[in-house]
Amino acid sequence: MQQTKQRILLVEDEEHLLDAIKLNLELEGYRVSTATDGKKALKIFKEERFNLVILDVMIPEIDGFQVAETIRLQNTEVPIMFLTAKNSSEDRITGLKKGADDYLVKPFNLEELILRVGILVRRGMKGDDLKELNSYQIGDKTIYFNSFELHHADGSVTSLTKKETMLLKLLVERRNEAVSREQILETVWNYDVYPSTRTIDNFILTFRKYFEPDQKHPVYFHSIRGVGYKFTDNHAS
């Protein structure tokens, strides 16, 4: 169980907006540090550890794009969300190239901001967990993610493909949650190739052969019509 409050660095030079966002985030249980210019933001970021950075693009001293670029040189994991009054596709692309995970255009709905913040913070937390996840046991079988191997109870070993391993890792990471086809595309296929739903279904069928005691009545790997896929493990901590 997570005991410590998740920490957010909020960088915004419009005082009224800074105060409003800070208050709403704190009401959601986050611990918020603030900065009104890029130089101060980088100083605070070096001194503390954060679960998310919310970054206005047009800020004094050093602009948001440069701040993001500097943060990414130090930390490739922390999620970054840009806030901006600019709505051009060029700015969005620039932001993503600088390492942003999300992009919200002003004026925005505070409820939408809170929802997006929650998604990014959870994603970052799961990323931390996943970096430490070298193996995972399903039933009497153990997946070793680094070596792409599935070890069976009888001592035999099945070699997994890279795509199988990546998809297993994603589903295990999001265990007991529905994972959308879009998330699978982004994480496993990196949008280079668009697999059909049937392709992903075939992976799930393969996983059922590996892990399910009864493939016709799966307890671990589920296809959820119109949504995506889910790995269920009620014994996981």
Image: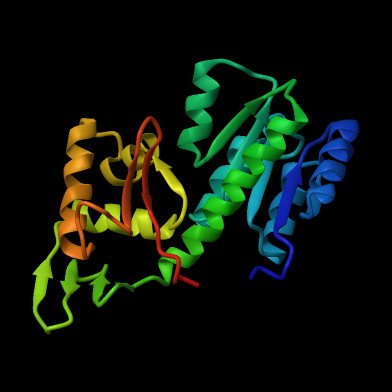
- Asked if residue 216 lies left or right of residue 1, the reply is left
Q: Residue furthest top?
A: 88
**Residue 41 appearing in the image:** yes
Q: Indicate whether 72 appears above or below 182.
A: below
- List x then y, in percent, for residue 77: 50, 56
For the N terminus, the quadrant is bottom right
Viewer-closest of 82 and 63: 82
- List x then y, in percent, for residue 192: 24, 34
Q: Indicate whether 110 appears above or below 183.
A: above
Q: Residue at x 77, y 31 (%)?
A: 110
Q: Indicate whether 8 appears above or below 57.
A: below
**Residue 193 appearing in the image:** no
Viewer-closest of 13 and 7: 7
- List x then y, in percent, for residue 61: 74, 39
Q: Quadrant of residue 21?
A: top right
Q: How many marks?
A: 0
Q: Quadrant of residue 148?
A: bottom left
Q: Residue at x 72, y 68 (%)?
A: 4
Q: Indicate whether 170 appears above or below 68.
A: below
Q: Residue at x 72, y 22 (%)?
A: 106
Q: How is the structure coloured here?
A: rainbow
- List x then y, in percent, for residue 181: 35, 36
- Asked if residue 70 lies left or right of residue 141, the reply is right
Q: Residue furthest bottom?
A: 155
Q: Residue at x 69, y 53 (%)?
A: 42
Viewer-closest of 70 and 113: 113
- Asked if residue 182 lies left or right of residue 41, the reply is left
Q: Quadrant of residue 10?
A: top right
- Asked if residue 77 lies left or right of residue 51, the reply is left
